[in-house]
Amino acid sequence: MKKFLTSFRFALRGWVFVWKEEPNFRYQLTVGFLTLGLGYYFDVRPVEWAVLLICIALVLSLELVNTAIERLVDLVTLDRRPLAGKVKDLAAGAVLLASIASVFIGSIIFWPYIFPPR
C-alpha cells in the first residue's frame, strides 16, 4: 500500500508541475471545466457525459505526455537539432489532433441543446 501511495504522490507532483509550467494545460483544463459546466446546464445524457469526460481526459493526458516528451528531449540535448524538433512537433501534434476532435465531438453533443430542432 505504501508503494501505491508513493506513486500516487509522484503523479500528483506531475500534475502540479504541468499546472505551474504549462499555460496550455491551464487553458485546456479551463475549457474542460467549462465543458462540464455546459453538460450540467444542459443536463446531457449519461452516454454524452462519458464521451465528454473521455475527450477531456484524452486532451489533458496528451498534454502531460507532450510536456514529458519536451522535457526529455531537452534533457537529452539542448542543441537545436532537427530530429529533436520533429519529436517535439509530433507530440504537440497529438495534442492538437485530440483537441480538434474534441471540439467536433463537443459540437455534435451540444448542438441539439443549443439549437433544438423545430
Image: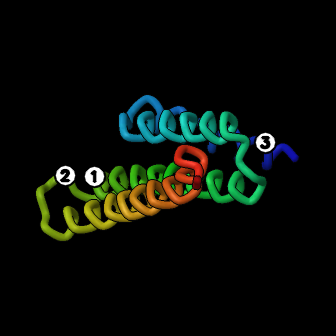
Q: Are marks 1 and 2 in contact (CB under 8 Å)?
A: yes
| Alpha carbons under labels 1 and 3: distance apart | 29 Å
Give the residue number, with chain letter if any, for mark 3. 5
Q: Residue furthest right?
A: 1
Q: Earlier in the sequence, mark 3 or mark 2?
A: 3
Q: Is residue 90 left or right of residue 83?
A: right
- Nearer to us in this view, 57 or 33: 33
- Nearer to us in this view, 82 or 55: 55
The reply to whether residue 95 is in sight is yes
Task: Locate residue 39, reporting x and y percent.
Answer: 65, 42
Give the residue number, with chain letter if any, for mark 2. 78
Give the residue type that dot 1 points to. Asp
Task: Locate residue 103, reporting x and y percent.
Answer: 45, 54
Secondary structure of the residue carrying tag 1 is: helix
- Nearer to us in this view, 42 or 100: 42
Q: Residue at x 46, y 38 (%)?
A: 18
